Image (spheres, coloured by chain):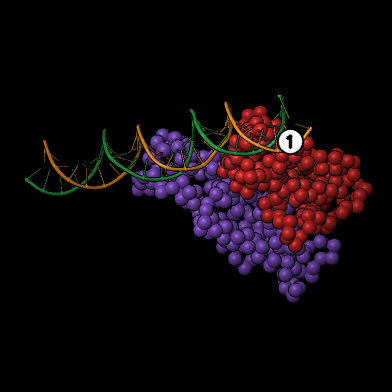
Chain colours: A purple, B red, C green, D orange
Amino acid sequence: MAVETRRRQIEDAASALFRERGYAATSVRDIAQRLNLQGGSLYAHVSSKEELLWSIACRAADRFHGDVGPLGRSDAPASQRLRRMIRAHVGVVTSAQRDAAVFLHEWRYLSGERRQMIAGRRDTYEALFRAVIADGVTSGEFAPTEPRMSAMLMLSGLNGIATWYRPDGDLTPDQIADQYADLFLRALAVPAAMPEPHFTTRTIT
Amino acid sequence: MAVETRRRQIEDAASALFRERGYAATSVRDIAQRLNLQGGSLYAHVSSKEELLWSIACRAADRFHGDVGPLGRSDAPASQRLRRMIRAHVGVVTSAQRDAAVFLHEWRYLSGERRQMIAGRRDTYEALFRAVIADGVTSGEFAPTEPRMSAMLMLSGLNGIATWYRPDGDLTPDQIADQYADLFLRALAVPAAMPEPHFTTRTIT
DNA sequence: GCCGGCCTAACAAGCGTTCGTTAGACTAGA
DNA sequence: TCTAGTCTAACGAACGCTTGTTAGGCCGGC
């Protein structure tokens, strides 16, 4: 309990510092100082600096997959799924901003197996967006496009939010998400010139 | 001459390493090793590690502003300017990939005045995109949108290319740029459903 | 013979991590 | 109720190593 709490405090302080200064530029003593501890004292709760990074990256990955994954696997129309995913993704990025930034940018300082694991979860997550876009294309909801590229574009854009979002800014996460979703969905929409004969046009290969 | 060349070699090696491992995780000895030198020997050509980072960030900033800036300030229609800017930006990102990545991600390890200078050039560059989008909106070429957000989205997407682009991949920079431009311009386009009446619709695309 | 370019050697500072120790709180037994 | 034992959380010093940087000397080409 008290141990658990302390551990969380350490992870939170580390998460903030890793985001502010980067993993390599943050020392164990920096983290300890935020909690008014000595450097060595952290090792009662943590087995190494890298394991700390690993924990933070994992809990961020959990949130992304947990919040966004199910929305992508529902059987709603692709455009609807996509909009919901975008909203959820922006939700994670803004509410767990520090963790998200660590997951997105600092994971590469992990080594070996741990690094591969996070890379794998990243890939799986990206594949989720690719799949929904591909679904929309084959169902005729979206204009033909290279899902690989549009998904990368979308995720780069969404992840950029973690860089510039400020909780005290004048835009709520949902406002941002909706505007982004509008832009993306318009980018993917089939040109209205010759409107599709409405719904269940699943037959396009 | 020989000095200039050596200096360039050092900058290039440093640029590659800063991109691969990050500035803080790259040691002066690492850089020297790439050129079969001893760590201390670099200091005949370089006054500090940070000055090296500064040089690399500057030359990247020069390329972005030099290649893209003029295109944004021409008096062509906004959509045309934007497409050209995107192509040029992707050109820089792919042809000076390492420098660009350093400019985009490692500049924050600069301190004091130098850091502010690069941040300023970044802001100016972003403002260029915002301005073109705003132009397009007021001229009726683009649907009403928040230029701040659409510009951030665009730049996040374009800069993400620096992360995943591989010169030996199966997409040329121009192909990537065109696909991205298509997506962006469709996202910004005024809905064709009820076309604007007047405004001398200068042909888009 | 000078001088640019590189070497080796050293420097102080800081790194992640370990370890013996301690202060305080809790618990059990007499 | 005292006391002995145990547990926890942290200290603070030290370890071996790496960091950025400096200094002095050697060598080859003008």
Q: Secondary structure at mark 1?
A: helix
Q: Is residue B124 left or right of residue D5?
A: right
Q: Chain of mark 1?
A: B
Residue A43 appears in view: yes
Q: What is the three-letter code of the residue carrying label 1?
A: Val
Q: How many marks?
A: 1
Q: From the image, tell me which residue sits under label 1.
A: B3
Residue B142 appears in view: no
Image quarter for residue D2? top left
From the viewer's side, name the closer residue of D20 and C23. D20
Q: Residue drawn 77% across and 65% down?
A: A144
Q: Position of residue A82 (x, y in %)?
A: 66, 59
Task: Please determine whether, in this image, residue C5 is positioned above or below residue B101.
Answer: above
Q: Position of residue B174 (x, y in %)?
A: 81, 55
Q: Residue drawn 59% across and 66% down?
A: A73
Image quarter for residue A115? bottom right
From the viewer's side, name the closer residue of C5 and A161. C5
Q: Position of residue A163 (x, y in %)?
A: 63, 43
Q: Residue drawn 75% across and 73% down?
A: A205
